[in-house]
Image (cartoon, helix red, strand yellow):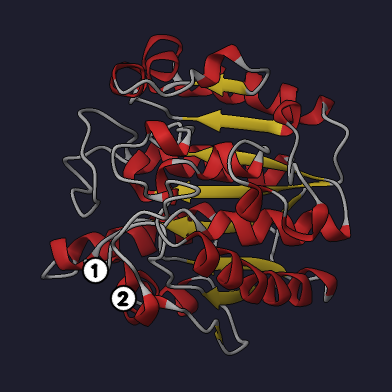
């Protein structure tokens, strides 16, 4: 990737409306304090998105079976304006969550301005229907929602349902297949979403999986892609600072290989980083490792 540079603008969007206020809301400020902006050579000030975290309600909405659907919609509109501003200016949007529900505002905003695909790098499918989720957390169902599955208050912002078509989504790194099926989640593999699970990576090797990923991405009729990176895709022993734990996962070198290949070979509009919880990382070693890994991925 030598010589390729990105005009990055960071957006801090620390919403936990789709999860719980137990620490993930500090992801952005912790990674920034660990030197992320400097490591990525970002010169612009960070865009701070107003959150509605103070209004968090732990009770499920009786109509949608989701936590905080109206607040998430409102936050999505706020975040979407910032996303559109950055993308329309020609810059690379680097969004720090928060939980995975921030993806709703991102993909709805992108749908307003063009045709975008989604590369979803996550240990989980995030494909629950609200009534099947044991928690009602929208972070359990964000991929389902952005592909048009779920309550209209979240799936049809600006009358744009779906924000991304199934055939324009690539999922990498899932390792909750057995758990998700046990809880009655839809099986993402039964859709036309292109899936490369953690088992695929272990069996075939990261190089072959990425070659197939790039081949598929290049065939899709979209103008650009968004990368969603949930840090729980990393192996639990190197990143236990997450809400839900699963054995196995990517190494930092595998993550960097994936991101480097995508950034070098595919038109990428931006990336969202979610779920890292600093409350489980008291000495901030994991934060520093994530910052260094992202820095190496962006070759700066």
Asked if residue 77 lies left or right of residue 61, the reply is right
The correct choice, above or below, for 296 with respect to 28 in the image is: above
Mark 1, residues whose alpha carbon is within 10 Å: few (<14), some, or many (≥20)? Answer: some
Q: Quadrant of the image for the C terminus?
A: bottom right
Which picture quadrant has residue 4? bottom right
Q: Is mark 1 on a helix, strand or loop?
A: loop
Name the residue rendered at 72%, 51% in the picture: 156
Q: Which of 27 and 292 is in front in this view?
A: 27
Q: Nearer the viewer, residue 264 or 203?
A: 203
Q: What element carries label 2?
A: helix
Estimate the spatial distance between the alpha carbons at disc 1 and disc 2, rounded to whole Å.
10 Å
| Lower sequence index among marks 1 and 2 | 1
Residue of label 2: 30
Residue closest to the far front? 62
Residue of label 1: 23
Give coordinates of residue 48: x percent, y percent: 53, 85
Name the residue rendered at 43%, 72% in the picture: 14
Name the residue rendered at 40%, 74% in the picture: 28
Which picture quadrant has residue 180? top left
Can residue 121 be seen? yes
């Amino acid at each position: 990737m030598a010589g390729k540079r990105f005009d990055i603008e960071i957006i801090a969007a620390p919403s936990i409306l789709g999860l719980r206020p137990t620490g993930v809301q500090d992801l952005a400020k912790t990674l920034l304090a660990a030197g992320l902006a400097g490591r990525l050579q970002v010169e612009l000030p960070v865009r701070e998105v107003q959150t509605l975290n103070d209004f968090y309600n732990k009770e499920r909405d009786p109509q949608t079976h989701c936590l905080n659907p109206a607040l998430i919609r409102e936050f999505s509109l706020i975040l979407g304006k910032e996303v559109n501003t950055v993308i329309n200016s020609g810059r690379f949007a680097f969004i720090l969550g928060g939980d995975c529900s921030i993806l709703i505002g991102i993909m709805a905003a992108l749908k307003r301005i063009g045709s975008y695909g989604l590369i979803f790098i996550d240990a989980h499918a995030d494909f629950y229907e609200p009534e099947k989720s044991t928690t009602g957390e929208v972070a359990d169902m964000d991929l389902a929602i952005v592909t048009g599955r779920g309550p209209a208050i979240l799936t049809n912002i600006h009358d744009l349902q779906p924000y991304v078509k199934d055939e324009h989504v690539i999922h990498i790194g899932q390792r909750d297949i057995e758990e998700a099926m046990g809880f009655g989640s839809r099986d993402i593999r039964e859709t036309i979403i292109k899936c490369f699970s953690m088992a695929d990576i272990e069996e075939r090797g990261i190089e072959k999986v990425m070659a197939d990923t790039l081949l598929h991405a290049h065939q899709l009729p979209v103008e650009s892609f968004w990368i969603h990176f949930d840090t729980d895709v990393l192996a639990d022993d190197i990143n236990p600072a997450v809400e839900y734990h699963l054995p196995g996962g990517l190494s930092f070198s595998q993550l960097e290989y994936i991101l480097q290949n995508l950034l070098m070979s595919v038109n990428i509009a931006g990336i969202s980083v979610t779920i890292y919880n600093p409350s489980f990382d008291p000495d901030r070693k994991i934060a520093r490792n994530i910052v260094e890994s992202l820095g190496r991925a962006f070759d700066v």
